[in-house]
Image: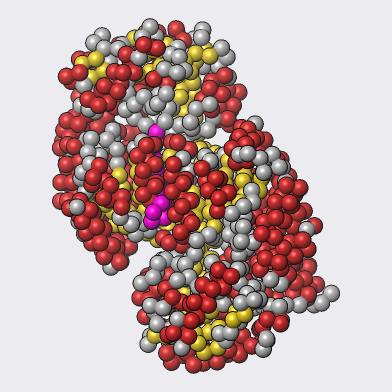
Amino acid sequence: MTTEMDAEAAVKELRATFSSGKTRALEWRVSQLKALLKITEHHEEEIVQALRSDLNKPEFEAFVHEISAVSAACKFALKELHRWTKPEKVKTSITTFPSKAEIVSEPLGVVLVISAWNYPFLLALDPVVGAIAAGNVVVLKPSEIAPATSSVLAKLLGEYMDTSAVKVIEGAVPETTALLEQKWDKIFYTGNGKVGRIVLAAAAKHLTPVVLELGGKCPAVVDTNIELKVAARRIISGKWGCNSGQTCVSPDYILTTKEYAPKLINALTCELEKFYGKDPLQSNDLSAIVNSNHFDRLARLIDDEKVSDKIVYGGQRDKSNLKIAPTIMLDVPADSLIMSDEIFGPLLPILTVNKIEDSISEINAKARPLAAYVFTNDKKLKEEFIKNVSAGGMLVNDTTLHLTVSGLPFGGVGESGMGSYHGKFSFDAFSHKKAVLQRSFAGDLSARYPPYTSKKLKLLKALLKGDIIGIFRALFGW
Amino acid sequence: MAADPCKDLEAELRETFESGRTKEESWRRLQLNNLLSLLEEKEDVIFQALEQDLGKHPIESYRDEIGPLIKSLNYALNGLKKWMSGRKAALPLAAFPASAVLVPEPLGVVLIISSWNFPFGLSLEPLIGAICAGNAVVLKPSELAPASASVLADLIHTYLDVKAIKVVQGGVSVGEQLLQLKWDKIFFTGSAPVARIVMTAAAKNLTPVTMELGGKCPAVVDSLSSSWDKTIAMKRILASKFGICSGQACISIDYIIAEKKFVSTLVELLKAGTLSMFGVNPKETNSMARIINKNHFRRLKNLLNEPSSKASIVYGGSLDEDNLFIEPTILLDPPLETGVMTEEIFGPLLPIITLEKIEDSIKLIKSKPKPLVLYAFTNDEGLKKRLSSETSSGSVVFNDAIVQYAADSIPFGGVGESGFGRYHGKFSFDEFSYEKAVVRRSYLVDFWFRYPPWNDHKLQLFKSAYRFDYLGILLIMLGFKK
């Protein structure tokens, strides 16, 4: 009961703040973005500690993937804000002549951001940057599965932000459910498809638009005739170097030809050893698995009897420290557990095909992923891949970096999600684009009005076809 | 009908889509051109259907449905190549060697559910978008306009690629069956209660939706001084209410807000205007559409029969249930709690609410759910600015009404209770596409400190670079080689 009342009270207060118009003012938005920036600049240590605590995340990842990414998002928004908030003048056509038109961005109002546990700092604040830039009031519900970060977020945002407009509500399922029952003007959810459906169904009750950033099995196709060492490093960096594979855009599985697989495995294992040493469980540069639930889930994938003889590297685990070593499997059966759902962990199955082109149909037979990767120098394969594979985003000859390009939207399609953000797309995701059309009283077209005559019909036909001569003829009765 | 027509339907369309046929530019152009032929060759058939379903005059049908569709088709044919080619994305200066582009892709197999008031317009405008974007489509027209639904099915199956574009006719149970299938997009035009049902069904399959709903579109009418302005304003107001499907349009002016000192002039002008536009006996002049059916007729009758609403009638008010005809009716200051002021009217009843100062209209408008359109008839630039910046609506139109429907460069859609998503012009293409981000890198430049094992030195390098910019780090990361 209290959680419902808390949620209701929070929304009520936020709605009042929004109605006051305070958050529409550019100065307010700038001040809040600057406050977020201060948090990243003055509390780095605290944030890094929290990420270590929640995920044993290496400082490098905490810094590059999370803290500096949030800082970059704030800076970009601060730089572009006045440009984004300017109305966009658009041309009008003869059908509404004479007229002037523009598209104005307005905030949607009271928005809810629900974030995930794997990049608990980034995925909480990146959308919040967009929400604030667009002039909304926000409730942020960080993931309870990363409790240290959730707590740090609540503390720091409580200290630095305008709490009448930006609130952090911590909690688990009951709190989230209570929040989802409220009426929001937008819900932004990052997480998995199962909860995504719950969020969308809750949004349906109030006809609330949503952005869902989900996941999927992101494939990486590896062709022959490439710079294998570089490719291997980039795959490793996108998989194990990103939160031990617990990343929505990590390469989930690899597709390569039967002949090339041994070479690839060789290159991967060679580079893996350079990065993490002979006993990766001892390396401090690998994130841990977030909790024992997920640890057990991943252990089951390794212990699946269908794959027991397919493990070619790794497989070691340390339950007390929730660590699993980088593990590679070769030719797992299509009906194995590891190929049924998104892995979200440090296990990399390699599937082999006869011809590399076959990988495209293999990929398309599965649900559309958030990202798809191809390593090749073959122009034809590149173009075929880009043309025929359906995914939220694609990267040729690398992994995960496309997220850093602020001019590109980041989002999924189908099971991997709906809507997108980053850069201006974040601002747009939390805005309503209002069309404003100005007509004058001069130049009225009587043909629009009853009583209806055939002359009027002629004129209307010509006008709607953009047929200038027809218009003249109709007007002069020819 | 076959045992489970819906299941086979889904399989067939998915097969067609997966064959890649609908992605070809030539296929899309062919469908659009065939739609043009359909509209030009079968104009009379369409007029007849609309006359049957709604008693629309052919000019109304042309002006509001066929004409705009032809315009949209020409606009789409003109823009298609450019829309399909995608766009380059901004990369940081002195980038990786890399390129980044956004490639528009069709969502796949989409469902369009349209409404009964503009059965052709509201079916085919979204269909144009779906085709332009390269999707396979099922169109479910409203069963409340059966002649139009039947003609749509006939004509579309004759003129268009029947393996990729299908019309499914039927009522609530057919609608429910269709909603059980897995769509890549649902485009819905209609009322909020049904919208909730559609979106809840869509949630099961994570299907993105566009909701084109309604609301009470207010028209703020300022005290205009010039008699020319007054005449034109009146015409436009009346045409947008009584002259377009008898007010059964999501973008009709629902109610007027005016200053007390102007209202007697306003009422006189409206009465005179109505008379001149619709005659003494509007039913006879054939210039007003019928109410769609008895249900809606009774709904409107009940609105009028509420005692305090009835008492506020200053013009019209007569009803003919047998002919489903309601004459142009004007009400002056019905109380704000009455049905006519709380529900979307969707009929030829025009309430006028009076206030002391015209600026007070902002408060009234904000007290109601966000409408699809905010109209204002005024020459006061200050008032225009305030109305636009202090209220929220799908769109804002100054000094006219309805015409925004024919514009291609501005989005058409709602916000809040009036819906989400938008279409018309290129927005239609976008609404049925998703943009795939494609980044290409080469192997030429790789950097050593992107990779573990981590040490303080590497981290310091990042931190010092970071003081400039995260993008800066990336540049350094990608530019350096020790």
Q: Is residue B78 left or right of residue A324?
A: right
Q: Which residue appears at 56% of the width and 85% of the height?
A: B317
| Residue B258 forms part of the magenta stretch | no
Q: Is residue B43 left or right of residue A307?
A: right
Please give the count of numbered marks on the rendered protein: 0
Q: Is residue A33 above or below residue B249?
A: above
Q: Which residue appears at 43% of the width and 39% of the height?
A: A417
Q: Position of residue A152 (x, y in %)?
A: 17, 41
Q: Which residue appears at 71% of the width and 81% of the height?
A: B285
Q: Foreground residue, A204 or A162?
A: A204
| Residue A211 forms part of the magenta stretch | yes
Q: Which residues are magenta?
A: A204-215
Q: Foreground residue, B474 or B310?
A: B310
Q: Position of residue A24 (x, y in %)?
A: 33, 62
Q: Foreground residue, B288 or B60?
A: B288
Q: Is residue B176 above or below residue B276?
A: above
Q: Which residue appears at 63% of the width and 39% of the height?
A: B3
- Camera sees residue B85: no
- Camera sees residue A321: yes
